[in-house]
Amino acid sequence: MDDNVKTLLDKIQELKTPLVSVYVNPAKPAIDCTPLSFKQQKDLISTVADGVVGSLKFQKILNGVIMENTALEDLKTTDRLPIILQLRANAIGDQIRVGGEKGKLSPILKKIKKFKVVQSKTITGDLTVEVEVPTLASENRIIQATIDLLKKDGEAEVGKNIGNVYTHEIVKYIRSIKFGEQELVFLDIPVSDRAKIVDNLPISINKQIIEFIQDIKKAETDLLTIELNGETKVLEIDVGFFDS
């Protein structure tokens, strides 16, 4: 590398970028984050052409950006939206596109302080299942296991791939399963074994886990819902959100 180029890069990296204060949890103070960088934006946008795997990569990179910029490893997946919405507004601005129409992010940002999600639940039946909102770090490990499995099976196995993604989505939210005196803590066992257990759970148990997940998704959808030109629309957090 040319010495002049290296010197310039060193100087750029020494620049003190103002921190962004983001609100996450009503019971906690705001978090100071480093702003989104151009490289992070580029990494998120680069996943657009990879199909199902690309969607998983996008989610994994997004989680990584949040952990890197906050320097926190214990954030939950329900912290993701409040943080990334505020970081995006700081880096790119208030203007967004929803369904091809121009809108503003600020109405959604105003709703963040009212965004609350139940973090855990005990499901009982033939088994006792403890479910909880996963951390970003835990979700990323499961996402990577899902990506590895999809690559192994190949893109042609569409039905199988959809099934694997569905199973691994349930896996994310299980903390432990207890049957009689035996208890399995999911973080203590490989993701592949967790998936096998989920595939063999009674439908009645999985139905309740899915309902817990759906309640979280509904709260997120409500947060992202805005009125635009007299119509109710939902903002998608995808590649386009970071390319406006």
Image (cartoon, helix red, strand yellow):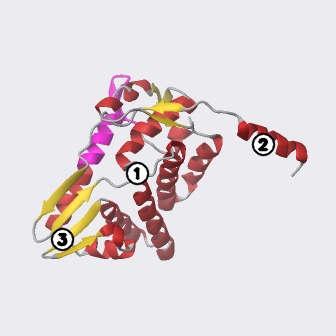
Q: What's drawn in magenta, residue-wise? A: 215-235
The residue lying at 35 percent from left, 29 percent from top is 226
If the image is split into quadrants, where does the C terminus sit? top right
Read off the residue under disc 2.
10
Residue 105 counted in the magenta span: no
Q: Is 48 placed above or below 109 here?
A: below
Going by the numbered disc 1, the residue's amino acid type is Asp
Residue type at numbered disc 3: Lys
**Quick one: 210 or 129, which is closer to the camera?**
129
Structural distance between the alpha carbons of marks 3 and 2: 54 Å
Which residue has dot 3 on it? 178
Q: Residue furthest right?
A: 3
Q: Mark 1 points at which residue?
A: 74
Tell me the amino acid under the disc marked 2. Asp
**Residue at the top extreme, as displayed:** 229
Residue at 51% in and 71% down? 151
Please check the rendered image and state whether residue 225 is part of the magenta-colored stretch, yes or no.
yes
As drawn, 126 above or below 217 = below
* Disc 3, SS: strand
The mark found on residue 181 in the picture is none
